[in-house]
Amino acid sequence: MMFKPSSPLFSGLLWKIPWRISQPQKARQRKRLRAVDKVVDTVSAALARNGQSTKAVDRWFKEMPREEEMLPRDKYTIFDKKEKTYRKGIHSE
């Protein structure tokens, strides 16, 4: 069930989104981030085997932290210009 009946908000159903992300959601997010790291490592290794490199991959390694290096704030929130703190939980998209 996508939503539970609740008090109407602006003549519609109020979506009940918890303010905190659950442990299984956190685990899935970490798994997705590790998968991205693995893809970048694979591409980099394949290019290195051929004696090549690209600016995009080099820039990725310089600028982007790996999953284990990221702060929880960066792992579980995204930028949103409409939010007061400019961050929004990934589970409330």
Image (cartoon, rainbow, N blue to C red):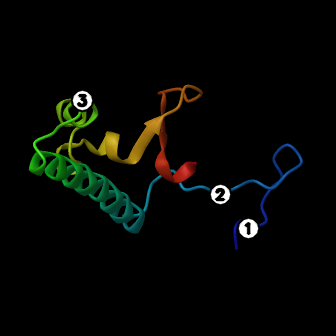
Callout 2 secondary element: loop
Q: Is residue 35 left or right of residue 85?
A: left
Callout 1 secondary element: loop
Say if mark 2 contacts mark 1, CB within 8 Å: yes
| Disc 3/disc 1 C-alpha distance (Å) | 49 Å
Residue on which disc 2 sits: 16
Residue on which disc 3 sits: 55
Please give the name of the residue rendered at 69% of the width and 67% of the height, measured from the top-left corner.
2
Judge by depth and name the residue closer to the eye, 37 or 68: 37
Q: Position of residue 14 (x, y in %)?
A: 75, 53
Residue 4: numbered disc: 1
Q: Position of residue 38 (x, y in %)?
A: 23, 57
Tell which tag, 2 or 3, sits nearer the viewer: 3
Judge by depth and name the residue closer to the eye, 67 or 88: 67
Q: Position of residue 11 (x, y in %)?
A: 89, 48
Query: Which class describes the residues within 10 Å of circle 3: few (<14), some (14-19), or many (20+)?
Result: few
Please give the name of the residue rendered at 70% of the width and 74% of the height, measured from the top-left corner.
1
Q: Is residue 23 left or right of residue 13?
A: left
Number of disc labels: 3
Identity, as a three-letter code, of the amino acid under mark 3: Lys
Tell which tag, 3 or 1, sits nearer the viewer: 3
Say if mark 3 contacts mark 1, CB within 8 Å: no
Query: Which class describes the residues within 10 Å of circle 2: few (<14), some (14-19), or many (20+)?
Result: few
Give the quadrant of residue 23.
Answer: bottom left
Identity, as a three-letter code, of the amino acid under mark 2: Lys
